[in-house]
């Protein structure tokens, strides 16, 4: 009877171990795949603005790759994708276009791929191991923002340095996600809205022409965590 009990315990333990491995495997594989793409296609430079991305090689892997995002001090260092047919495609596909529950970093199909729209939103999953936008929520803390205030967007023809000015939780689909504006006055009112909702006040972004928002989900159902930023510098190539 005792041997039978031990056998049952061992079988149960092996079952749950196998289940845990299956759950972790996609995260491990994705981390390795993203590590390899950085090693192969991103130059290692001391200055963030000087990084070089081999977009020719990346777009040979997947023509949906339109840029690259890097946020110093976080694990955010990924290609940006844009599918021409489906906004939700890269919620369930990786940068190669293959199926992945971890998804990829992406913008919606209607957005300006040159980041020249008034408001551009980049989406990514909030993953427990800090992959994708899993580390974005650290910007709820102003001390983190003050230490690492910049977001870098690399495009084939330019590099854009954005400065973070706002971070907060909001409901999905609310005013935070507004993409079109009747006129400049309405756009500036929207910028004021994003400032008033922020966890902190670090600068006055009014009068600026372009806003970049990073958006990810939270543990609170329909709530999202967003980080707003404005252009600080454009480096032409």
Image: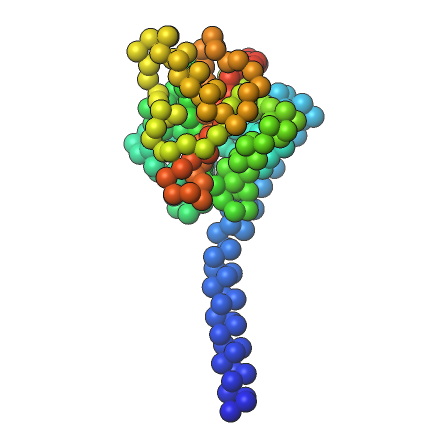
Q: Eyeballing the image, is 103 above or below 72?
A: below
In the rendered structure, the answer to whether residue 54 lies left or right of residue 94 reads right
Q: Nearer the viewer, residue 71 or 196?
A: 196
Q: Measured from the top left, where is residue 154 in percent x and y?
A: 53, 23
Q: Measured from the top left, where is residue 168 in percent x and y?
A: 48, 30
In the rendered structure, the answer to whether residue 22 lies left or right of residue 143 reads left
Q: Measured from the top left, where is residue 130 in percent x and y?
A: 55, 42
Query: What is the quadrant of the C terminus in the image?
Result: top right
- Work out whether residue 45 can be spotted: yes
Q: Quadrant of residue 193?
A: top left
In the rendered structure, the answer to whether residue 170 lies left or right of residue 150 reads left
How was the colour assigned to the protein in this rendering? rainbow
Q: Nearer the viewer, residue 147 or 57?
A: 147
Q: Eyeballing the image, is 151 above or below 32?
A: above
Q: How many tags in the picture?
A: 0
- Write the residue at 42% across / 26% down: 121
Q: Quadrant of residue 59?
A: top left
> Which residue reaches farthest bottom?
1
- Work out whether residue 97 can be spotted: no
- Write the residue at 55% across / 46% down: 129
Q: Measured from the top left, where is residue 201 in percent x and y?
A: 55, 20
Q: Eyeballing the image, is 149 above or below 129?
A: above
Q: Nearer the viewer, residue 49 or 182?
A: 182
- Write the residue at 47% across / 8% down: 207
In the rendered structure, the answer to whether residue 25 lies left or right of residue 87 reads right
- Write the residue at 51% across / 21% down: 229
């Amino acid at each position: 009877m005792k041997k039978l009990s031990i056998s049952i315990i061992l079988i149960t333990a092996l079952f749950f171990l196998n289940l845990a491995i299956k759950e972790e495997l996609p995260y491990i594989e994705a981390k390795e795949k993203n590590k390899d793409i950085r090693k192969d296609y991103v130059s290692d430079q001391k200055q963030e603005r000087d990084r070089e991305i081999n977009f020719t090689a990346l777009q040979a892997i997947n023509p949906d790759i339109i840029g690259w995002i890097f946020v110093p001090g976080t694990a955010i260092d990924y290609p940006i994708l844009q599918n021409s047919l489906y906004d939700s495609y890269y919620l369930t596909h990786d940068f190669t276009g293959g199926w992945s529950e971890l998804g990829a970093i992406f913008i919606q199909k209607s957005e300006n791929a040159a980041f020249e729209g008034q408001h551009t939103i980049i989406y990514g999953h909030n993953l427990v191991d800090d992959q994708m936008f899993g580390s974005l929520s650290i910007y709820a803390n102003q001390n983190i923002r003050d230490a690492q205030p910049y977001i870098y967007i690399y495009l084939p023809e330019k590099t854009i340095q954005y400065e973070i000015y706002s971070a907060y939780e909001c409901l999905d689909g609310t005013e935070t996600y507004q993409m079109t504006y009747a006129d400049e006055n309405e756009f500036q009112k929207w910028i004021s809205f994003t400032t008033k909702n922020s966890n902190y006040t670090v600068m006055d972004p009014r009068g600026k022409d372009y806003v970049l928002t990073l958006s990810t989900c939270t543990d609170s159902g329909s709530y999202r965590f967003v980080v707003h930023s404005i252009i600080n510098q454009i480096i032409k190539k």
